[in-house]
Image: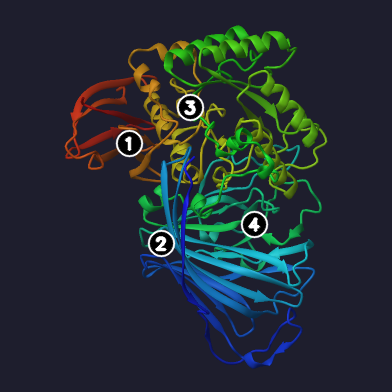
Amino acid sequence: MKRKFLNISLCAMLAVSLASGNVVLSGCTGGVDTSKLGNTANWVTSSPDGKIKTEVVMDYAGNLNYTVKRGNVTVIEKSALGIDIVEDDLSLLTVKDVKTENVKGSYNNISGKNSKVDYDCNQTTITLKGWTFEYDLIVRSYDDGYAFRYNVRKCDGTSGTMIWNEEKTEFALPEGSTLWAQPYAAINTNGNFFAYENEFQNLRTDELADVSISMPMLYKVKGTEVYSLITESDLIGSGFYGTFLKEHEDNESTGILQTVPTPAGYLTDDNKIGYPFESPWRVGIVGDLKTVQESELVEKVFDDAEPWRPDDYDTLSAEEKKIYDYEWVDPGVAAWNWIKYPSSQSNYGLHRRYINLAVEMGWKYVLVDGGWNDGLNVSDFKNFVKEANDKGVKILVWCHSFNDFALGNVVSLRQKLDLWKSWGVSGIKIDFFDGQSTDSPKFYGEDTGTIDWYEKIYQECAKREMLVNCHGSNKPTGERRKYPNVINREAIKGNEFKGVNASDAVKELFIRRVVGPSDFTPVVNPLSTGMTMACQMALAVLLESGTPSMADFEDVYENTLIKEFYKNIPSLCDETLFLGGDPDKYYAGAVRSGDEWLVAGANSVVPSMAKVSFSFLEEGVTYNAEIFTNHETDYKKVERRTAKITKDDIEFFDMIKNGGFVVRLTPVK
């Protein structure tokens, strides 16, 4: 992996504006600051292009709040900031220091929407002192949004554990905003499980009483074309729990959403947080639909973060150190047959057919799912893996996140991973982090114990050069910036739900796909009348994934009509573009891999027309276009035609209910 570049320039110091009036007490210096009686302060952080302004205000009573504007449009109304811990009264604060700086650089992706990413923001760090604790409120404004976090520490520099009462952070949505959100609902009646696999619902700001909302959440400011997507980043490794959004009982039906602990979890002492502590980033992507859809802000907040290395890295040999360059991480399509053969995963004759399919299609992986090791004959399995590897195909195996590892025992984890690695296995699809199908769980969902368990799995797999595909899991929070081997993730309502429809999928494209890889497991032939073949083909393009799992019968891919298309499904994108749409109507986008482009559209329940300008194509190059559109009468078929296309061309695509289209573009040689 190429090293990333960071250019941090200090722009100004102590950007504080003060007025008169209020007693503020200080503990870290042991005194009472009477010089600031009645004072208030405000700090404005503007994006590099000047369009987004995030303002933090300390009022006369010492309360912190913030607002966000994009131009003249208010994106976040006055919203509370701050934290509440048992060990100190952090409502009694003095301002110790304020500094501003520009944070700018770039990094290269192993997998993701774009192979190279530039980041640029202005940052304000406000250091606030209590009696024995202090914290930095770090606020950033990017051209495509804002982010902030809390860094908490003991004034004397010691470490320990604090009791976290509450995070006061609010997101006050402008009145009348339209939301697309995934409310919390327990998966079944046997426990409060949640795996981010529900539908995104349309809601208004006055419909949120008693509703817990998961992130990411998208909303549109009434009367404007300004959208914002709220989520969190850098959760894994934070020592914190996953967060939901919910109105406080004093703010019912106001659209003022507070960050609250995940409603799905097991630990009863989940409020014990170690310090010094860096909270996850609170992230708001802001702009028109194109800006929001193309944003990588969830991962850009990591700046120049180096991929994870073990604590003993400096003592390792040169060969061992090379592991943590992560050059072994190899994005590629996976052949996967569980949807079609859920009870046959221990049938290695079946999997050999999919190995041959992978060879024929040029795919890199075969994924064997739950039940692969039922009555396992180790010798037979090792021969199977060797046969696959000899043909250039790598094997991924399913496992249970808790039951397969003694309910979260790291020694058991290491032993199993060592064993599978010795058999030639290249990675794991690890399931049921939500706690389903777990015997006497220690933790599940997004409590602090489970978040810590995620990281241990990532680390132990990295040490063994093994990929990770998380299922039954929480949403992505940018972790592949630290763990590039975490190449795929579920946390989406995909084809495993055989009744998933195009309306669900279109909303997922606008919301879920923004924050990271999505293991939707596309098929060719739709599994219900709620999807067409053209729509399924489009989803195989539009849902970014490091190891997209192709889930149909093996002979389906022999269809000469679509074979070349599926041979060229991208797992590594050099560029990703949003071309048009609406969360309730359709989504159109394009991805580039090398010098080839794939353009696709997926439609919801009302027939739509997508206008596609090919102005993004290279100047002076003519492309051969292979175009797939809906069959007139059969939702399980597509029409195919060819054309020549240049950057000067515009095409109109009629999409039927639940329909779609795909265009594969290759330069004329």
Q: What residue type is disc 3 on?
A: Gly
> Is residue 342 something one can see in this rendering?
yes
> Which residue in the protein does label 1 denote?
607
> Which residue in the protein does label 2 denote?
222
> Quick one: SS at disc 4?
loop
Picture disc at residue 20: none
In this rendered view, identify the residue nearer to me: 62 or 427: 427
> Quick one: SS at disc 3?
loop
Residue located 68% across and 92% down the image: 34
> Quick one: SS at disc 2?
loop
Q: Nearer the viewer, mark 4 or mark 3?
A: 3
> Is residue 407 something one can see in this rendering?
no
Q: What residue type is disc 2 on?
A: Lys
> Which residue in the protein does label 3 denote?
332
In this rendered view, identify the residue nearer to me: 373 or 421: 421
Distance from the alpha carbon under mark 2 to that under mark 4: 23 Å
Q: Earlier in the sequence, mark 1 or mark 2?
A: 2
